[in-house]
C-alpha cells in the first residue's frame, strides 16, 4: 500500500486527512470525555446532517452547510441549557432528531436524482477532496491555536468550573468557545468516519490514553498519536479489504480499546499476585 | 473592627422554594465564624451569594465595602467535595496553581516563577508538599481538603470561606483542619460551614445559625432554645460527650 500512497493522489489525501482529523480528535476528544460531553457531541454531529441536506438543496458545498448547522446546534444547546436549565439530554435528543429529519427533508425536496449520503453518514476517507482537506486544515489549525492560547484557563474550567468562576474568569465565554470548537471538530471528522460513527473516534483514543497518564496535555498528545494509528490502520484495512473506511477505523479502534483494557487489568492482577506472594514469603 | 461582609435583607428563591429569607449578617474583620444549620438550611446558598455565584432576589451584599462583582479576588473559596470530578487528569500542584489564575484572560498564559514559589510555600505550610505529583483522586479526604485550602490560600485572600470542609473526615483529620484554620485566622477572616459542633466549639469565636432565616449570630455559646428552633431536635444529640461544649445547658436542667 505504501507504493500506492506515493502513487495515488486520493491516498495521499486520505493519509493527510487522517492526520488532520487525529489532531482535532485528540485535543477535543480528551476534553469531551473529561467534561462528559460525548452525547452532546453526538447530538451536534447528527444535527449537522440537516446542514448537509441544506447544502445539496441550495447547491453549495455540503460540508459548509454542516459547519453552519453544527455551530448553530452547539450555540443553541449551550444557550437554551443556560437560560431555561433544561436537562441537556432532552435538548440533545431533540436537536439530534430534528437535524436528521431536516436533512431527509432537504434531500427529498432537492430536484433531480437523490445524492448518495452514505459517505457523510459513515465516512469515506478515500474520497476526501482537496477542498475538504483545506477546510479540515483550517479548522484543525483554529482548534489547535485556541486551545494553546487558553490552555490554563480551559484546564481550570474543565476541572472546577465553580472555582474558576469565583476567580473572576469568564467561564461562560470559555463554555461557548469550547462548544464552537466541538462543532468544528465534528466537521473535520465527518469526511473521515461520518456523522454516525464520530463519537467513537472522539472518545476511544482519549479513553485509552487516560489509562496511562493523568496529565491533560500528555493525554491530548497521546490521543492524537493513537488517532493517527487508528485512522491509518483503518485506512489500510479498508483499502485491502475494500470496505468502508469509517467502519474499519471505528472497529479497529474499539478492538484496540478492549485489548488494551484487558491486557492492562491482567498485568495489574499479575503484579498484585506477585507482591502478595512476596509478602507471604517474607 | 470594620465589617468585611455586609448582607442586608438578602432573600434567595430557587423557583418557588425560598432558600434564604431576609438575611441580615455582618461579618467583622478577623472573625472566625461557623455557620451551622440543618441540611437544606441555605448554608451553601449563603456562601454562593457572597461569592457572586448566585444573585440574590432581594437585598444587598457588600464585600469589603464594595458590590460583590468587584471583590471576587478578596475571597478564597473551598467548595464542597462534590464540585469536581476526582478522576480528572490533573495533579496536586496544578490544582493549587489554579488559585494563581487572575481574572484577566491572557493569551499563552503560563505560571510565573513567583506563582510557583507561592504555591510551594503554601504547600509546605499545609504539609502537602510531599504530594505534589499525585493525581487529585489519589488522596485521602484530609489530604484533599488541605489541597483545596492551599488552592484558596494562594489567591492571597482577605476572607476564607469553606463549605463543610470536615464532612466525611475522621476525628483526627478534623482536628488538624480546624487547627490550620485557627492559625490562618490570625491573618484572615474565616467563614466555615459545618455540622460539627464539637470541633466548632473549641475553635471558632462566633456562630451563625441558619435555617432559611438567620436564627442566631453571636458568641459561640448557645442555649437550647435557639438550637431546637434551628434544628428542630433536642440538643443533647449535638453536644453529647464533647469536652468543649458549645452549648450552655439550660438553667434548671441537670447536666
Ligand atoms: N440549584 C438549586 N435548585 C433548586 N433548589 C436548590 C438548589 N440549590 C439548593 N436548593 C434548595 O435550596 C435550599 C438550600 O440549599 P443549600 O444552600 O444547599 O443548603 P445547605 O448547604 O444548608 O445544605 C434547599 O431546600 C435546597 O433544596
Ligand atoms: Mg451545603
Image: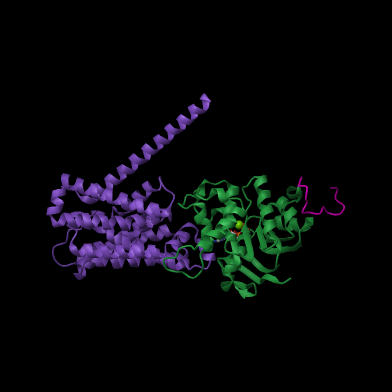
Chain colours: A purple, B green
Which residue is at the far top? A281
B33 left or right of B103 in image:
right
What segment carries the magenta color? B240-255
- In this rendering, the answer to whether A273 lies above or below B171 is above
Which residue is at the far left? A7
Main secondary structure type of the part rendered in magenta = loop
- In this rendering, the answer to whether B246 lies above or below A78 is above
Residue A131 position, x and y percent, is 20, 65
Residue A217 position, x and y percent, is 40, 55
Q: Residue at x 36, y 37 (%)?
A: A263
- The quadrant of the picture occupied by the N terminus of chain B is bottom right
**In the image, ligand 2 is in what quadrant?**
bottom right
Q: Tell me, yes or no, if residue A252 can be seen here.
A: yes
Residue B21 position, x and y percent, is 65, 67
Which residue is at the far right? B252
Quadrant of the rendered image containing residue B193: bottom right
Residue A170 position, x and y percent, is 48, 68
Magenta-colored stretch includes residue B243: yes
Amino acid at each position: 500500500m505504501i507504493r500506492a500512497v506515493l502513487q495515488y493522489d486520493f491516498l495521499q489525501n486520505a493519509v493527510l486527512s487522517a492526520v488532520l482529523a487525529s489532531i482535532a480528535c485528540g485535543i477535543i476528544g480528551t476534553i469531551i470525555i473529561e467534561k462528559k460531553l460525548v452525547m452532546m457531541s453526538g447530538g451536534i454531529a447528527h444535527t449537522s446532517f440537516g446542514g448537509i441536506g441544506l447544502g445539496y438543496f441550495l447547491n453549495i458545498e455540503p460540508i459548509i452547510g454542516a459547519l453552519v448547522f453544527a455551530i448553530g446546534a452547539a450555540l443553541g444547546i449551550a444557550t437554551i441549557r443556560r437560560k431555561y436549565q433544561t436537562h441537556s439530554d432532552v435538548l440533545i435528543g431533540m436537536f439530534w432528531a430534528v437535524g436528521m429529519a431536516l436533512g431527509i427533508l432537504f434531500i427529498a425536496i432537492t430536484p433531480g436524482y437523490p445524492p448518495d449520503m452514505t459517505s457523510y453518514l459513515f465516512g469515506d476517507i478515500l474520497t476526501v477532496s482537496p477542498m475538504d482537506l483545506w477546510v479540515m486544515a483550517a479548522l484543525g489549525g483554529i482548534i489547535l491555536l485556541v486551545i494553546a492560547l487558553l490552555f490554563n484557563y480551559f484546564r481550570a474550567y474543565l476541572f472546577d468550573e465553580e472555582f474558576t468562576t469565583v476567580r473572576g474568569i469568564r467561564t461562560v465565554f470559555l463554555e461557548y468557545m469550547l462548544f464552537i470548537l466541538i462543532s468544528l471538530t465534528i466537521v473535520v471528522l465527518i469526511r473521515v468516519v461520518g456523522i454516525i460513527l464520530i463519537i467513537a473516534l472522539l472518545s476511544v483514543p482519549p479513553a485509552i490514553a487516560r489509562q496511562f497518564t493523568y496529565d491533560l496535555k500528555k493525554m491530548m498528545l497521546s490521543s492524537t498519536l493513537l488517532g493517527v494509528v487508528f485512522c491509518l490502520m483503518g485506512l489500510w484495512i479498508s483499502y485491502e479489504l475494500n470496505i468502508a473506511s469509517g467502519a474499519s477505523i471505528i472497529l479497529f479502534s474499539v478492538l484496540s480499546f478492549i485489548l488494551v483494557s484487558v491486557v492492562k487489568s491482567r498485568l495489574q492482577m499479575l503484579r498484585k499476585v506477585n507482591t502478595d506472594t512476596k509478602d507471604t514469603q517474607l | 473592627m470594620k465589617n468585611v461582609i455586609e448582607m442586608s435583607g438578602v432573600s434567595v428563591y430557587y423557583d418557588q422554594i425560598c432558600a434564604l429569607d431576609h438575611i441580615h449578617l455582618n461579618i467583622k474583620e478577623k472573625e472566625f465564624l461557623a455557620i451551622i444549620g440543618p441540611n437544606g438550611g441555605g448554608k451553601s446558598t449563603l456562601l454562593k451569594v457572597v461569592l457572586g455565584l448566585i444573585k440574590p432576589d432581594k437585598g444587598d451584599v457588600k464585600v469589603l465595602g464594595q458590590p460583590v462583582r468587584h471583590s471576587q479576588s478578596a475571597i478564597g473559596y473551598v467548595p464542597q467535595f462534590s464540585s469536581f470530578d476526582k478522576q480528572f487528569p490533573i495533579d496536586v500542584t496544578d490544582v493549587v496553581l489554579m488559585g494563581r489564575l487572575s481574572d484577566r484572560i491572557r493569551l499563552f498564559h503560563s505560571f510565573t516563577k513567583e506563582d510557583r514559589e507561592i504555591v510551594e510555600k503554601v504547600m509546605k505550610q499545609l504539609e502537602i508538599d510531599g504530594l505534589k505529583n499525585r493525581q487529585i483522586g489519589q488522596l485521602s479526604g484530609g489530604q484533599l481538603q488541605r489541597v483545596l485550602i492551599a488552592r484558596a490560600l494562594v489567591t492571597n485572600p482577605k476572607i476564607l470561606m469553606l463549605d463543610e470542609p470536615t464532612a466525611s473526615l475522621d476525628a483526627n483529620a478534623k482536628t488538624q483542619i480546624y487547627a490550620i484554620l485557627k492559625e490562618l485566622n490570625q491573618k484572615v477572616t474565616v467563614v466555615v460551614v459545618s455540622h460539627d459542633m464539637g470541633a466548632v466549639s473549641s475553635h471558632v469565636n462566633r456562630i451563625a445559625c441558619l435555617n432559611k432565616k438567620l436564627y442566631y449570630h453571636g458568641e459561640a455559646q448557645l442555649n437550647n432554645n435557639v438550637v431546637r428552633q434551628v434544628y428542630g431536635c433536642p440538643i443533647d444529640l449535638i453536644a453529647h460527650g464533647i469536652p468543649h461544649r458549645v452549648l450552655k445547658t439550660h438553667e434548671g436542667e441537670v447536666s
